[in-house]
Image (cartoon, rainbow, N blue to C red):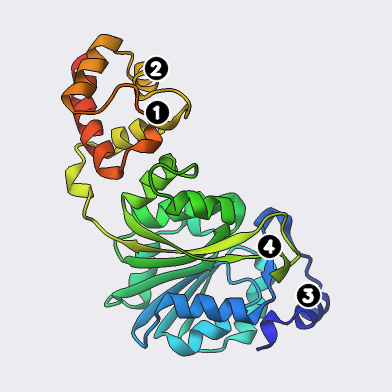
Amino acid sequence: MKSSNPRHIQTLLKDSRINIKKKYGQNFLIDGNILEKIIQLSSLSANTFAIEIGPGLGSLTERLLPKVSTLLAYEIDQDLIAILNNAFDDQKFHLIHDDVLKRDIDNDIEKIDENAHDVVVIANLPYYITTPILMKCLEDSKRIKRMVVMMQLEVARRITAQKNTKDYNALSIAVQYRAQTAFGFKVPRNVFMPAPNVDSAVITLDFHQKYTHKVKNEPFFFQFIKACFRQRRKTLLNNLHTFLAVDKSRLTEALETLEISPQSRAESLDLETFIIMSNYFYEIHQEEIK
């Protein structure tokens, strides 16, 4: 496949008079083995409606197209639109020139195939907007079922982290609240052109709704978990005192009622415990603001 060949990429960019743009976080993958591993991890079928965010020069696109029923791609860089349209003259390929963060993804899917059900996002996400893209897909879409995405290694470890580890934080909980996460594999920086300053990793997210009915107020829940991790070295009691502005004796009593030590730290608690705490303290918070 040519699109992941470094010499082909250099020639294509030169002939098209295109410069690699740092503002879009463009790092083109030049290792075909990594691309194949992404495809294998994606568990695609002939019924899959694939979404690619930032196809770039199409190195992943050309491997996806033969394996899926439909491929919807979002590309923000005007300079790459003509290249992609010329390379993929296929009825299965639908290219939208826009910032994915500004799109109604479900509406775009429905315009192409209102019966699409096996919807999978596959992408090499730009480092600078990894979390906004993830949260948009997790929060705004009811059609996306799965994501297989590459991102900065440090962020990948946080998203897939479990309690009692140094990488476990509010982002871990916010993502795992909506998806089951798994670490796929590490990707070294030298398989990109240009090479970024850090290594990457591919992770999978399988969307679920098993926790959403348990949370009384989602905005408060997300604020709550951020507050619990705001200062990692502080105890739950101190972080919650700062966040809720409730007397420490009352907070201590509340935590003990929930059978949680006031001296425990956020990284020692699992998602279910955060949901229980959030619901309990939401009621206290409502009383305080009345």
Nearer to us in this view, 5 or 248: 248
Residue 13 location, x and y as percent? 78, 75
Residues at discs 1 and 4 in contact (Cβ within 8 Å)? no
Callout 2: helix, strand or loop? helix
Residue 213 drawn at (x, y percent): 17, 47
Q: Amino acid at mark 1?
A: Ala
Relative vertical location of residue 168 with respect to residue 228 in this rendering, above or below:
below
**Residue 54, x across and y down, in percent:** 57, 66
Q: Earlier in the sequence, mark 4 or mark 3?
A: 3
Q: Residues within 10 Å of mark 3 (few under 14, many from 20)?
A: some
Q: Nearer the viewer, mark 1 or mark 4?
A: 1
Q: Amino acid at mark 2?
A: Thr
Rendered location of residue 115, percent (x, y): 27, 77
Which class describes the residues within 10 Å of circle 1: few (<14), some (14-19), or many (20+)? Answer: many
Residue receiving disc 4: 26
What residue is shown at x 42% (from left), y 39% (from top)?
A: 170
C-alpha distance separating marks 1 and 4: 34 Å
Q: Give the distance between the C-alpha atoms of the residues marked 4 and 3, in whole angstroms.
A: 13 Å
Residue drawn at x 69%, y 87% is 2
Calculate the distance from the C-alpha at mark 2 to the C-alpha at mark 3: 53 Å
The tag earlier along the polypeptide, 1 or 3, is: 3
Q: Secondary structure at mark 4?
A: loop
Q: CA distance from mark 2 to mark 1?
A: 8 Å
Q: Which residue is mark 1?
A: 227
Mark toward the viewer: 1 or 3: 1
Mark 1 or mark 4, which has the lower sequence index? 4
Left or right of 277? Residue 106 is: right
In the drawing, what numbered circle is on residue 42?
none
Is 254 displayed left or right of 30 in the figure?
left
> Could you tell me which residue is drawn at 51 percent across and 89 percent down?
90
Quickly name the residue at label 3.
13
